[in-house]
Image (cartoon, helix red, strand yellow):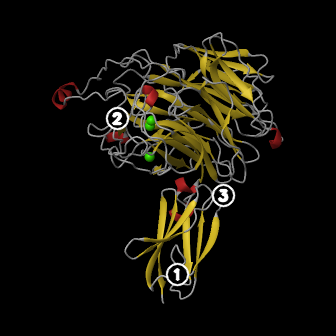
Amino acid sequence: MKKVIVIILPVIVYALQPIVVDFTPLPKLRGDEHINIKIGPPYTGSRQSPGDQIGTTAYDLQADFSYGQRLMVDGNSQAHIDWMWQDYPGQSQRYCAWNGRFANGTYYGETQASNSWSGYVQLDITRETEPDSQRSVITYHYDAGSGYFSWIDIDEGNLWGFWSNTPRSPQVPGHIWPTVCVSNNNNILMATGDYNANQHHVYLTTDEGLTWTEVLTMDSCASLSRHLRSSGNTGSNRVVYVHTQFITDSVASGQLDNDVYYVLSTDGGVSWGPHINVTNYQPYPQDSVRAYCEVNAVFDVNDNLHITWSGRKVTDSYYEASKIFHWDEINDTITVVSSPSIYYTEPGGWWIESDTGGDYGAWRMPADMTQLVNDKQDNTLYCLWHGNDDYTDYSQDSIINGEVYGAFSTDSGISWSDYVNLTNTRTPGAGPGDCDDEDYATVHPYVVNDSIWTTYIEDKDAGAYPQMEGSLTENPVRCWVFSKRLITGIEEHHNMEPSAISLRIAPNPFVKQTSISLSRGQSAESMELKIYDATGRVVKSFPRLTPDVLHSMMSWEGTDQHGEFLPAGVYFVTLQNGDQCITKKVVKLR
Ligand SMILES: [Ca+2]
Ligand SMILES: [Ca+2]
Ligand SMILES: [Ca+2]
């Protein structure tokens, strides 16, 4: 949706009144729509965002004005990942794709895990004590012939990738966009909603989907924001259901003006406590903040509940300004996670849409899609979110190229560090196929092996094409496991760069032969080595290394591609790894 341009002069007069936007809700996408839209070029691999490519999808939009959990880590330090796949450029199939990352950093491989025309996938893992028994639980909606239902399916073994095609469902017609979570006593909970989103429902199964019980119903919710989270602490069966619910004094037709609510269970979702309003926002102008339609939660190592959400400023046209907020059950205080961007001058640290910058797109805000992560070693909290701190970075089609941001807190969320732009891949003006728009990241809620585990879509044309933004592109799906120090900044940036490459040449200068050693981090692609002369001409290229090679050593006798000796002089050795490149000078003496 394009931004509403407000003429400056009358705004001065009406500055004290909320600007009521004539807001028509966008369609709620079900994942089965065919969309006529211009096709962009296929992905050539020429540019890339951080992390390992684990698949592709042409359906860049992974969540319909909410998001959820598409990556979880099991007791073997393995990541279980799913996403909504669509072929490129065809739109002939759309299904739940699944992949697994083994502890050594290799992958199972991209796998179809549901029938075609399944939509809006999420994931958790069963909680057997023995890690080798822990299995992916995927959820999605699908029409098996009698209308759309929400389903779960469970892998036959630990990263077996064996989907027996016996998905199970509470069998409630029209209840779609499911989210899933598994409690520590292995109860599986699914939250779904009516197509018009009037009600949210939570269903419980204690027999892996054979039978289901409805355990919660929330009326008058209006948006698709529903989030289930179980405790990751051994022996705790705490589970929380967090959602947003519209406020009746809304200036934007309800769906965008919300309070944040939660309900707690201590027995794995069988019985539930009271329905608690965290934000309790008062009518404008008492409060000029509202929750948007996204929430996330984590139980920290002391089993205390933390919730984050994206909030918007109600005095502006409807999604113009946003912040990320945090609340926890011990301090019972709402704090701001996102420190002010250096690019934005709006008082109060709001991240704002700029009149001169790009468009954030439908159902999006300048800072949105928040995710919480707890480090059980020291109870540090990490918060990741989407957005842009540089509103000059937008695509040829004027859609903002997104980044993933992170901040941390060592005092249970009372105060937060300055944010770090974690991806920091700026592609201003890029056309279809050339954008680095990292989007729809979901993060495992705990630090594992000092790392933060995330999956996201590397959208090669910023903007969600099912919302008629930009062109259809073939988009890499990435798994990025990075050191928590990328956010805390405790180590030097060079050392924490997960895909950092290095190049050493010795002896240098050399007479007869020199050795070139090269290495890279875990999460990069194949390396390529070339030697240039002082005029910039390639004199020798070495064969591209296979992607599994982390370290290698080449010897060079000062010869060209045909084995002929090159003249004495200065040469440049260049190591390319994805979009990283380093060059070192080498001197041949005679
Ligand atoms: Ca980016
Ligand atoms: Ca796109
Ligand atoms: Ca985007």
Q: Quadrant of the N terminus?
A: top left
Would residue 467 be found to the left or right of residue 317 on screen? right
Residue 82 lies in what quarter of the image? Answer: top right
Residue at label 2?
A: 359
Label 2 Cα crowd, 10 Å radius (few <14 / some 14-19 / many 20+): many
Front of the two marks 1 and 3: 1
Lateral position of residue 410 relative to residue 153, left or right: left
Badges 3 and 2: C-beta atoms under 8 Å apart?
Answer: no
Q: Disc 1 designates what residue?
A: 558
Q: Is residue 530 above or below residue 352?
A: below
Give the x, y percent position of residue 532. Answer: 44, 72
Residue type for callout 3: Asp
Q: Does 16 appear above or below 562?
A: above
Q: Return the disc, 2 or 1, that comes first in the chain's sequence.
A: 2
Chain-order first, disc 1 or disc 3:
3
**Mark 1: few/some/many CA within 10 Å (<14, 14-19, 20+):** many
* Residue closest to the eye, 388 or 339: 388
Asked if marks 1 and 3 touch (Cβ < 8 Å), the reply is: no
Give the Cα distance between marks 3 and 2. Answer: 39 Å
- 3 or 2: mark nearer the eye: 3
Q: Is mark 3 within 8 Å of ligand 1?
A: no
- Residue at disc 1, secondary structure: loop
The percent coordinates of residue 101 (x first, y second) are 69, 46
Residue 548 disc label: 3
Give how far across and how far down residue 526 sits, in percent.
Answer: 58, 58
